[in-house]
Image (tube, grey):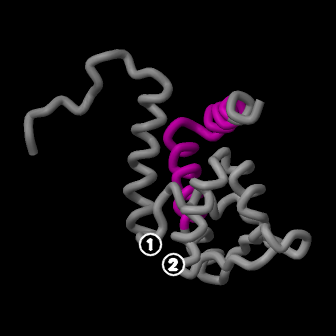
Amino acid sequence: MSGVNRLPAVEPHLPMLMGMVFGRLRERLAEEAPELRPSQLRVLEWLPPEGLTITELAECAEMTTQGCGQFVRQLAALGMVEVAVADHDARARRVRLTPAGREARARAAAVLEAYDEAWATQVGAERYRVFREVLEEVALG
């Protein structure tokens, strides 16, 4: 190991801290669900059982329709989603999870739940509950 200081040279700001946390999560997700990138998980997490059109999915995930379509193609190639013509519009495509997609999403959810539990243990259940409440309020408005 090099002698590099692993602490930032400046007071850590919120995006920096979040990036550090996400880095640890990405590493663990890569171990538990290696076929699934975090960016792909972001798309899978928005899919309800009845599915969504690519446009609806893009809106939910706050992506462009074109970008979301690229992720959907990747996920379809991995067998995690199926894409079919939407009932209401032959030009639209409805995206639904496959059993493989549900299983990968469940493994990722287990990793996230384990981190939730570990963090609550680390800082105390009440502090973590308040932290989550405040973060949800800031993130969701």
* Magenta region: 108-135
Q: Answer whether residue 122 is magenta in the image.
A: yes
Pinpoint residue 100: horizontal percent, then vertical percent. 59, 81
Amino acid at the residue labelled 1: Glu
Residue 2, above or below 90:
above
In the image, what residue occupies the spot 67% across and 45% down? Answer: 62
Quick check: can you spot residue 126? no
How busy is the neighbourhood of tag 1: few (under 14 within 10 Å), some, or many (20 plus)?
A: some
Q: Earlier in the sequence, mark 1 or mark 2?
A: 1
Counting from the top left corner in percent of width and height, residue 112 is at 56, 56
Residue at position x 51%, y 78% in the image: 78
- Quarter in which the N terminus is drawn: top left
Rounded to the nearest angstrom, the CA distance separating label 1 from label 2 is 8 Å
As drawn, the label of residue 78 is 2
Residue 19 bears which disc, if any?
none
Query: Judging from the image, what secondary structure is the residue with disc 2 in?
Result: loop
Could you tell me which residue is drawn at 64 percent across and 32 percent down? 131
Q: Secondary structure at mark 1?
A: loop
Dominant secondary structure of the residues highlighted in magenta in the image: helix
Instruction: Tell me whether circle 1 and circle 2 mark residues in contact (CB < 8 Å).
Output: yes
Q: Quadrant of the C terminus?
A: top right
Mark 2 belongs to which amino acid?
Leu
Q: Residue furthest top?
A: 11
- Residue located 74% across and 35% down the image: 140
Residue 35 is marked as 1
Q: Is residue 42 above or below residue 62?
A: below
Q: Position of residue 130 (x, y in %)?
A: 69, 31
Q: Quadrant of residue 19?
A: top left
Query: Vertical placement of 52 versus 120: above or below?
Result: below
| Mark 2 crowd level (few <14, some 14–19, many ≥20, 10 Å Cα) | some
Q: Is residue 126 left or right of residue 20?
A: right
